[in-house]
Amino acid sequence: MTLVWLAIVAIGIVTILNLILIVGIVRRLREHTDKLASLQLGDIQIAAREGDTVSYELATDTTGTVIGPDLFACAQWTFFSEDCPACKEGIFDYIKGARARGPEIAVIVGTGKAADDMVAQVSAVGVTTTREAMGGPLQKAFSVAGFPAFVDLDNGVVQHSGFRRNS
């Protein structure tokens, strides 16, 4: 009979310890969830900050036409890289909405076949498209640090920049 009572007490102690452990784990998960929720991609500097001025950089589109200062200063700029998985997935959504937006300039970064395909896809919908190697002059002018990067300019002043298009 004492053996049965000892077993019941042991099971009770293990159950209480298990409950304490579960409560601790749940509390810790809530703390981490709050920390992850407070981390926003917008806090990461991906391109020139809002309010920064981007000076005109001589650029030509893929047909050889010079992108003039007026278009340069008041366009929505998008930077895609051939090495970026998010760019390869997001380019289709970009193409779908390209006609509905104002003046657009897409900068395709890369020199390989994937970049060729991106240029063809974006150019096909009438978006002004330019291409440059990694670390090119447009990326430097816009302080691009990651891809995809979306930058809205108004008279050369950055209105929005980030991983996502301003909605």
Image (cartoon, grey):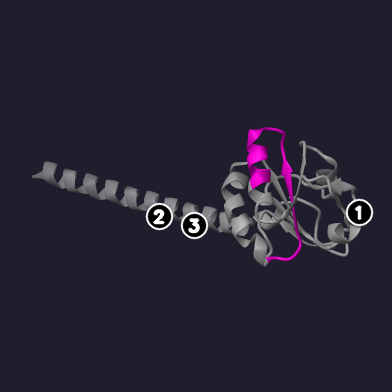
- Kindly identify which residue carries mark 2: 23
Amino acid identity at mark 1: Ser
Magenta residues (range): 101-120
Q: Which residue is under mark 1?
A: 55
Q: Secondary structure at mark 3?
A: helix
Would residue 12 appear left or right of 79 to someone viewing this image? left
Picture coordinates of residue 134 (x, y %)? Answer: 76, 36
Residue under pointer 3: 30
Disc 1 crowd rating (10 Å Cα; few below 14, some 14-19, many 20+) is: some
- Residue at 83 percent across and 45 percent down: it is 64
Residue located 66% across and 63% down the image: 99
Q: Amino acid at mark 2?
A: Val
Q: Are marks 1 and 3 in contact (CB under 8 Å)?
A: no
- Which corner quadrant of the image does residue 7 belong to? top left
Q: Nearer the viewer, residue 2 or 80?
A: 80
Cα distance between the residues tagged 1 and 3: 45 Å
The label on residue 32 is none
